[in-house]
Image (cartoon, coloured by chain):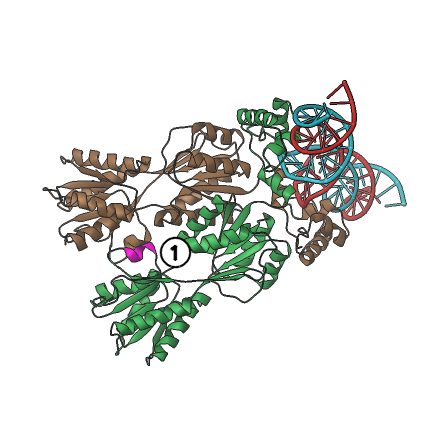
Chain colours: A brown, B green, C red, D cyan
Amino acid sequence: MSQKLFVSAQEVAERAGVSRSAVSRTFTSGASVSPKTRQKVLDAADALGYHVNHLARGLMRNESGIVCLIVSEIGTPYRSALIRALTQQLQNTGKIAMLINTDRSDGSVDLALRQAIRYRADASIILSGLPDKSITDLCLKNGQRIVLINRDDDREGPLRINLDDEDAAARIATAFVRAGCRRLAFANSQAGTPSLMARERGFVAAARGLGLEVVVERFGHTGYESGRAVAQQLLTRKERPDAIFCATDLLACGLMDAARHQFSISVPDQLCVAGFDDIEQASWSSYQLTTFAQPVDIIARAAVSWLSQETEAQPENRSVRLHADLVWRSSIRGG
Amino acid sequence: MSQKLFVSAQEVAERAGVSRSAVSRTFTSGASVSPKTRQKVLDAADALGYHVNHLARGLMRNESGIVCLIVSEIGTPYRSALIRALTQQLQNTGKIAMLINTDRSDGSVDLALRQAIRYRADASIILSGLPDKSITDLCLKNGQRIVLINRDDDREGPLRINLDDEDAAARIATAFVRAGCRRLAFANSQAGTPSLMARERGFVAAARGLGLEVVVERFGHTGYESGRAVAQQLLTRKERPDAIFCATDLLACGLMDAARHQFSISVPDQLCVAGFDDIEQASWSSYQLTTFAQPVDIIARAAVSWLSQETEAQPENRSVRLHADLVWRSSIRGG
DNA sequence: GCAGCATTTGCACACGCTTGCAAAAAGGCG
DNA sequence: CGCCTTTTTGCAAGCGTGTGCAAATGCTGC
């Protein structure tokens, strides 16, 4: 019934009394078209409600304008903040984001990348998991770019954006020690993501350098509930930690809540806590969490600006390492 | 350099020794293809890394498989939860989500819908703002479906999914009264979204029915900071409220934090608080917020299943009203 | 083996667009 | 006004698919 198709360039051309190429050129930046035909076309297009068919355009130009965001746990504060920044940046440069949800199952990311190929996405930005090499090679071979955010990996081709996780972890270790803490602990999830492991590694190493041994506890996924569970493990030890660095703000929130409400431990008087990500909740007055800020806007800008670069530019500069600023609040004594 | 195009059906056909239509039919469900040619095609496709070009397919079939999610403030807990549910559901039915960020500026949603038209999206799901009628008409005329979530509107055509906001507000009013509260207040934002206003209306009306007048305060956007600001207004009144219904969980969190940490008011002993949305943070032990659950999964299912329905089915059933369950926690006395 | 039928296959056109190429128009200049 | 240069315009080919149609193939039952 309403299957009367969208209005095409042909119809616009007829109404404007010009050729179909003229209307095409009107909507192609940098094409040669005289001001008055251009105006005629624009008028006709407006009257008819014409919009360039980007499917067809993508087919011809071999460039769809689509960028795939591949991400799991979309609902999580840090992830959604990053998605917001990325979609924003993409829109600013005339591109558009496709969002693909992955789960923890193996091959989930591969499936997502296949979808990206089907829609001939210009690029894929991967925030979760790590695809099989055969798939990324396929993407790259076909001119599709790949950006890996916070998934350290040494393969060539993709742009890799990472933070100085290890260094940040070292900084927080010294901050703990300076606050008078001696029994350090690290709360992690079992996810085993490269960046999470880097934080763990860096923290343990730095503590050891300061002459301290770190108790490491890992549990479940990177969420509030896991934070509570880890608190259960850490705060019932004979030698109770007096400082805990959590791999994630969500873990930290769960851990703080458990410490305060379940174990009646005062933060920061009896226990210092730090997190990572600087999610919005970290600044809420119930937490006032000292944490490291993920520079989401800078990350997004780096990713998107690389996508708009010419293919030939800087083939080497494929790895970006950004600095995570320490945001000092009151979950650590002193300061 | 890597501009060697993607592999096409033509190449697969040649390698498999069949016609191009055969490979097309192999990837078209319900097409007539003998098992053995099918297998030959699949083998060749796999070897070559062939993937159907969905741009071209969309062009032919006049059905892209793309669904646009148009949403502002993506990073917000409730929004991102809904996005998660929607993308999930869409993927389950073989569709894919495009995500478009809108801001508060007028015409932002219109621009997004134009983008949806350009990519010939099969449908648009609008979570924020309300587009101009001329645009939605254009979409509808071209067979693009529209779903409006929580933006009550009486125009015909789109599927409208709403909650029983007014009724929920009435229920919480009686809950407050039953808990012994008498000085009721409503904390809202200045956004003026239909559903927010419905909650306000319902609360005020129900309270009046119970013989109580409600103090209404509105501030800024629907976020944590606004909650703090509203607390400032409400908790410094001579007649301090003993129960506050917040239009949003984020408002409630901000308000509770301000009440406890800034005004040293105990919740729920001296002040009962309720929210709306049941975001994850509402269940955190620092808040334990009594609130109404947005049934995001049901909303998503309703939206997506309607999209997969035949055009002709139930032309009338274009409005879905869902029930918001009251999630009872400990920010209200008793229970 | 052959007529009759169902199934499979290939051809060719269509989808809406971009773009190289050559023709046409416009503009500059003496 | 005529010649030359620059800009504009239309034509037509092609991008990678789906699909109606007719020819070809396979199968069944005599």
Q: Is residue B193 visible?
A: no
Q: Could you tell whether B131 is left or right of A321 in the image?
A: right
The answer to if A312 sits in the magenta stretch is: no
Residue receiving disc 1: B78
Q: Is residue B21 positioned above or below B94 on the image?
A: above
Q: Position of residue B334 (x, y in %)?
A: 23, 67
| Most foreground residue, B103 or B13 | B13
Chain letter of mark 1 equals B
Q: Position of residue B286 (x, y in %)?
A: 24, 57
Q: Which residues are magenta?
A: B279-284
- At 27% from the left and 55% from the top, the residue drawn is B284
Depth order, front residue of B30/C16: B30
**Where residue D28 sits in the image (x, y, percent)?**
66, 27
Picture quarter containing residue B23? Answer: top right
Looking at the image, can residue B285 be seen?
A: yes
Q: In which quadrant of the rendered image does the N terminus of chain B lie?
A: top right
Q: Which residue sits at x=51%, y=54%?
A: B125
Q: Residues within 10 Å of mark 1 (few under 14, many from 20)?
A: many
Residue in the picture at 60% in, 48% down: B120
Q: How many marks?
A: 1
Query: Is residue B281 rendered magenta in the image?
Result: yes
Q: Nearer the viewer, residue C2 or A26?
A: C2
> Which residue lies at the image location 24% right of the left edge and 70% below the top edge?
B271
Query: Where is residue A57 drawn, in percent x and y?
Result: 63, 42
Residue at far bottom of view? B211
In the image, B206: left or right of A189? right
Callout 1: SS: helix
Overall secondary structure of the magenta stretch? helix
Q: Relative to B116, say whether B331 is above or below.
A: below
Amino acid type shown at disc 1: Tyr
